[in-house]
Image (cartoon, coloured by chain):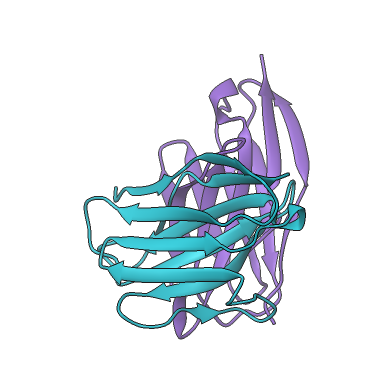
Amino acid sequence: GAVVSQHPSRVICKSGTSVKIECRSLDFQATTMFWYRQFPKKSLMLMATSNEGSKATYEQGVEKDKFLINHASLTLSTLTVTSAHPEDSSFYICSARGPLGEKLFFGSGTQLSVL
Amino acid sequence: KQEVTQIPAALSVPEGENLVLNCSFTDSAIYNLQWFRQDPGKGLTSLLLIQSSQREQTSGRLNASLDKSSGRSTLYIAASQPGDSATYLCAVGGTGTASKLTFGTGTRLQVTL
């Protein structure tokens, strides 16, 4: 199946710093990628839809200035958590629609811990 | 607004047992339904995808059914193995936005020796 690579898998940062998470489709082109957030023992919540070459679409309640998304190429989308605070600590997962356009393939996730 | 519920939240079974995981959704106007597996601290692995026009899909020991009218899906796992231990998530794709999924809260499965 299609492979989505997410990096880093784990990051610890100080409060006030910014953190960038990368999501790459390795063997296919993804015009659309999705960013999710997951709290412990909770389900995934869609944060935003990342569109190649245009602005991301954010879900209600998600601060676009806080969570900057850039989708500059057909294989790479990045999520930058700006001025991170402890409440931003969470598991972030990206996904991309597969080459056949049906299934979603997910990255391995990034565990962000803000001290 | 679509809401997806999974029951039970947690399940522990001895190795070899057949088991059923349940998923229900409130809005039957769906595009598709997908079952995923998530290991602790990891991403999601797609198991089965059922289109809204389909009734079931099978892959190996897994069988997923869909009853759109009643808003239900089940994931059947035959002859469970310890390696099946994980959290299983169902996700519903809405019409017109096929890739925008609404996830259930998952069922944490533990298969014991």
Relative height, residue B40 to residue B27 (above, below):
above
Expressed as whole percent of the image width and height from the top left, the position of residue B15 reads 63, 20
Residue depicted at 39% across the width and 55% down the height: A23
Expressed as whole percent of the image width and height from the top left, the position of residue A63 reads 64, 76
Give the left or right position of residue B66, taking residue B111 as reference.
Answer: left
Residue depicted at 38% across the width and 63% down the height: A77
Residue depicted at 53% across the width and 73% down the height: A48
Give the left or right position of residue A74, taking residue A15 as reference.
Answer: left
Expressed as whole percent of the image width and height from the top left, the position of residue A80 reads 51, 62
**Residue at the far top in the pictured view:** B113
Q: Quadrant of residue A66?
A: bottom right
Relative height, residue B39 to residue B82 (above, below):
below
Viewport quadrant of the C terminus of chain B? top right
Residue depicted at 62% across the width and 47% down the height: A112
What color does chain B have in the rendering? Answer: purple
Expressed as whole percent of the image width and height from the top left, the position of residue B52 reads 47, 73
The chain in cyan: A
Q: Is residue B52 visible?
A: no
Viewport quadrant of the N terminus of chain B? bottom right
Q: Quadrant of residue A45?
A: bottom right
Q: Is residue B2 visible?
A: yes
**Residue at the far bottom in the pictured view:** B96
Relative height, residue A9 to residue A86 (above, below):
above
